[in-house]
Image (cartoon, rainbow, N blue to C red):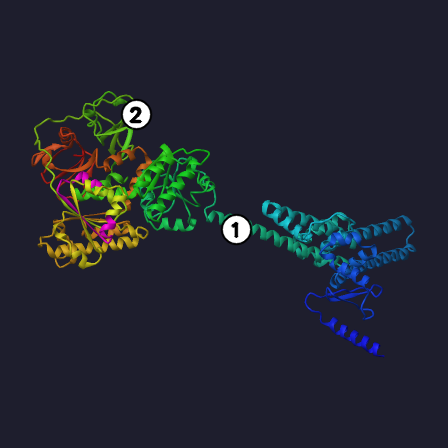
Amino acid sequence: MPNHSSRSSEKSSLFRRSKTLPTGSYRRFTTPLIPTYRYDSASDLRRDGDGGSCDSDTTNSAVAVLNSESAPSQVLATQSPSQRITKLWTHFSLTHWLKLICSFSFLYVMFLRAKVAKLEAENSILLTRCSRSSSNNENLQLEDVNNRAAVLYSVIMTIALPILLYMYLDDLSYVKNLLKRTNKKKKKEEEVPLKKRIAYSLDVCFSVYPYAKLLALLFATVVLIVYGGLALYAVSDCGVDEALWLSWTFVADSGNHADRIGVGPRIVSVAISAGGMLIFATMLGLISDAISKMVDSLRKGKSEVLESNHILILGWSDKLGSLLKQLAIANKSIGGGVVVVLAERDKEEMETDIAKFEFDLMGTSVICRSGSALILADLKKVSVSNARAIIVLGSDENADQSDARALRVVLSLTGVKEGLKGHVVVEMCDLDNEPLVKLVGGERIETVVAHDVIGRLMIQCALQPGLAQIWEDILGFENAEFYIKKWPQLDGRRFEDVLLSFPNAIPCGVKVAVDGKIVLNPSDNYVLEEGDEILVIAEDDDTYAPGSLPEVRMCHFPKMQNPPKYPEKILFCGWRRDIDDMIKVLEALLAPGSELWMFNEVPDQEREKKLTDAGLNISKLVNIRLVHRQGNAVIRRHLESLPLETFDSILILAEQSLENSIVHSDSRSLATLLLIRDIQSKRLPCKDSKSNVFPSSCWIRKMQQASDKSIVISEILDSRTKNLVSVSRISDYVLSNELVSMALAMVAEDKQINRVLEELFAEKGNELCIRPAEFYIYDQEEVCFYDIMRRARQRQEIIIGYRLAGMDQAIINPSDKSKLRKWSLDDVYVVIASCQ
């Protein structure tokens, strides 16, 4: 009895433990004929039959079976057939067995139902045999019933087997590995289930092949029609062809099955209609997705541009508006051109911003595409190889980052396999980075250094007031601009005769055919040779042609020498990146004894270090002396410490620290301009204003009175801010990025013009100048423009226009050059002359 109670208590304890197994425990279900083991750990193995401890052999065998999952190759080789059957039996869970039993039960029910239908049909035939005399019809009916039953079985099995196979696909793979006898060692790595591999293959197929979805949908439609037709043939009395047609109608229109009679035909027709609705819903989804992708591709600018001989703009900046305007004006004579813009922005945003510019494109089409100029695929998308000119805009980042990006774009352009048809115009920000870009790009690259252009123009405008407006007329396409063309009928003529041969243009130089060099303002004795081209200033490239030589009167005129240069006092407010280059230009243009005051927030020692690092040797400056003052240009008390009323010219520079923010930079420049004019108006004596636009008490009029003493040149980056300042006329002139856009457009239309602009902007060679009328005429003398041009040639100058006394705008390339006119000594002339 003690032993029995002890055994009973132990069994009860094991029974209680079996109800709540700990984590990681294992429970084996089996039939009563096969012993069942359970364990709570590897060392606690029990047999459910007797509750006692099993012997060591049984324990070792059970442990080997339990560890078969971690080492299947070793266990399978030593297991007996009965053990493998046990393994197979215990592998399937109760859920799998229930699924399998339900599936086979369904098949068996369908089989019994078909058999009952067959027996009913045979019974019907036997009943009708008594009333019919022909036995052939009975045999045919019986054969037809057998055929329909065979078709029904085939359809059911064909549909059910793939479903069952997919449900137990992983289990079949496991059974295959279990029943396979091998002594070879397998690698201990986890195998991917077959279901996942099939799903992955389908996913790859649908992703790689765009038409795979449509083919799969077509295949599913055909399968549904064929199997549905066969099922209808099996459960109804119609023929095969009629059943297939009915199946198609059920797929195409789900409402066609409403008139079916009988349980079998109704079930089959409903199934076909449901499958048809699913197929058509999938088809509509695919079509909608394809249309959405196509519309999205068009909206985002991903389609290819099929253009040639167009102008391609790479990048987006604040200069784009004025650049498009100049290109539209340049192409007006040919009815408009095509400009393609490629930028890393959304296509709709670009088109919206271009529409906000509110200027007439004059027939020019602007096509926007979204993409990167650093990707060859995006460059090919905009037909880069067929463009007649490519403009690389600088970014809104700082100068070094913008130039680095421009260099990468040039490298991408050199990698185009088809080659480039046109030249490339690159906007640079720092003059020091220009040689590297030219080295990479080669002869096709033309650079326009934005900071350098603005800086040199500011200096020229400070020394010669009114020159900026003349440059704006020449650089833009709205008035007169530079053109180069060959005129064979002028070969063999001297340049002094060529100068007067164009009624609607003014020759300025010659492009020599031998070396391709452009010579500005050549001597009168230069004879045009075959192949030479003539550089002129004209309204458009089709508005001028050589004519007969006009009659020019040779008469005496005042031969005055150029006035001597006097020392000047100039103030720089702010710090630019290329301020060292501006100092070099002033050193070459100013007279000895001049002073350059530099007022900014950079400490004095740091200024000298920056200038020295930029390559400027301060000790070798001869004509100018640097005077350093530290302060904030937007604080009034700092500006009041300067003798603002004593400066001949004041240049308000855009701060280098604010070059990333155009609005902030312009706001600072505008505040500095207002403060300087207000301080000057209070220190200088009041004078009568030349303009009556504003009342005498207006603050703008008071500031205008200060402009008679000193010239203030403001650097405004945004053209919209420029218009606001220009209206008030509190600054003599405002220079903005609009001039850089004009230069880019002109070089894009003809890259040879870049050589002309480089020489005119340089401190050596020829330059644009404003000369007083007393150099060429007497007061109230009546002569024609041709006479004045001939007189200017005796000074080795070319007159290209004039500005009459009392006029704000200069006239470049006057139309009626042979008309007599009275001239005043208050008039001024615009000339191309050699730098002195």
Q: Position of residue 611 (x, y in %)?
A: 25, 45
Q: Secondary structure at mark 2?
A: loop
Q: Nearer the viewer, residue 245 or 607?
A: 607
Q: Quadrant of the N terminus?
A: bottom right
Mark 2 and mark 1: span between their CA atoms? Answer: 57 Å
The mark found on residue 292 in the picture is 1
What amino acid does circle 2 point to? Asp
Was residue 604 drawn as part of the magenta stretch in this picture?
yes
* Residue sitting at x 39%, y 49%: 350
Q: Is residue 774 left or right of residue 162?
A: left
* Residue sitting at x 75%, y 64%: 94
Magenta segment boundaries in residue numbering? 584-607
Q: Quadrant of residue 818?
A: top left
Q: Is residue 815 left or right of residue 179?
A: left
What amino acid does circle 1 point to? Ser
Question: Counting residues from the N terminus, which is met first, the one under dot 2 or under dot 1?
Answer: 1
Was residue 305 drawn as part of the magenta stretch in this picture?
no
Q: Nearer the viewer, residue 817 or 722?
A: 722
According to the image, label 2 marks what residue?
515
Q: Quadrant of residue 24?
A: bottom right
The mark found on residue 755 in the picture is none
- Outermost residue to the bottom: 1
